[in-house]
Image: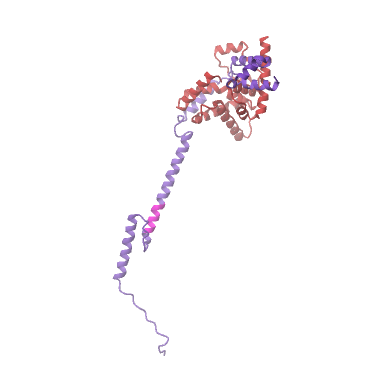
Chain colours: A red, B purple
Amino acid sequence: MQNGENRDCNALIELAKKGQKSAFTQLVKMYYGTVMYYLLGMNIKHADAEDVAQEAFINAFRKIDQVNTSGSFTGWLLRIARNQFIDKLRREKKLDTSGSQFEIAEIPDDRTPEAHAVSTAGVESIFADLKPRERVILELRVFQGMPFCELAEIMGMTEGNVRLVFHRLIAKLRARFEEKAG
Amino acid sequence: MAEKECEKIIDQVTDPRNLNDQCRQHIKVCSECAAVIACMVWTRAKGSPTADLKPSQAFLDRIDQSINSLPDAGTPGISGGGSNLLTWVLGVAIAATVTFGVVTSLNRESTSAPAVSTGKTLPAAAEATNTAAEAESRLLDAQPAAPTLKFPSPADDVD
């Protein structure tokens, strides 16, 4: 997340701590994609991931007082999502993973006309074939500057593994970049 | 510079807070790293890879409904407030148990009326104990001496 966005996020967290539910709704909108891709990276169906995300956000609201704005809000939120997912697995013994291939058609398309125009201009296509897990790693590392050690802990991987995935991802993006640049 | 060095530089470059002069110098002379940096800048300009997934209105409504049914964040009853309430209930329960124990013990002492006061009892209880002891002493004084039983001696004549 860029610095400006980080400041916005911290301001929203402070407002949510004071009980402003609308501020928390803004946080839900901001982090929905990250939480969803994180859960989809665990190889579960979109509908199940959405249920877990919903529970995770509600739980996050209950515990919002525990957030330390000097730490990583995303990391905290994703840990809640992971615990929620584990709880769900325990409750139901196992989730149906038969539909693990995430279907784009299921995603509600309620983007603004501007965002839609940008995406149709090919902006999104660079991420189009990235796996959910790769998207989350890219988001957390490049956009939020999360250290590899924390990234590894959140993703349930070793630090070396995360670095390897990240460097492969960079190589993939670089190839695409050079292709676009002509 | 070795490929391993470049990887370190790329690791640092992806987190701008770690970008130091050494990195900057390296980027100027290493075309590989410069290309990766350009790619990073390009990627950042495209926006977050997770931003294409937006919550549906139904999802937001469900969240709103759930959080509206909860008390406000930071009020007792949720998060830290729950443990405060539990501490308060436990405190009251312990205080009630101790009070009950003391009262029961005092009642028992007042009915048993010990001969010697320990001096550690509460003033009212001590007074009650002393009064009971004095009354018993007065009663004993007022009573006539107990009759002495006389049994025949084995030396007496037996018919």
Determine whether, in the image, residue A172 is placed left or right of residue B132. Answer: right
Query: In this view of the protein, which residue sits in the foreground, B45 or B125?
Result: B45
Determine whether, in the image, residue A8 is placed left or right of residue B139. Answer: right
Determine the residue positioned at 62% across, 19% down: B22
To which quarter of the image does residue B87 belong?
top left
To which quarter of the image does residue A48 belong?
top right
- Figure check: B153 above or below A159: below
Image coordinates of residue A3 in percent, x first then y, are 53, 19
- Figure check: A79 above or below B56: below
Determine the residue positioned at 68% across, 18% down: A172
Quadrant assignment for the N terminus of chain A: top right
To which quarter of the image does residue A162 belong?
top right
Query: In this view of the protein, which residue sits in the foreground, A12 or A93?
Result: A12
**Residue A56 appears in the picture as rendered:** yes
Image coordinates of residue A2 in percent, x first then y, are 55, 19
Task: Identify the magenta region.
Answer: B101-109
Is A166 magenta? The answer is: no
Query: In this view of the protein, which residue sits in the foreground, A92 or B110?
Result: B110
Determine the residue positioned at 61% across, 11% down: A120
Is B108 magenta? The answer is: yes
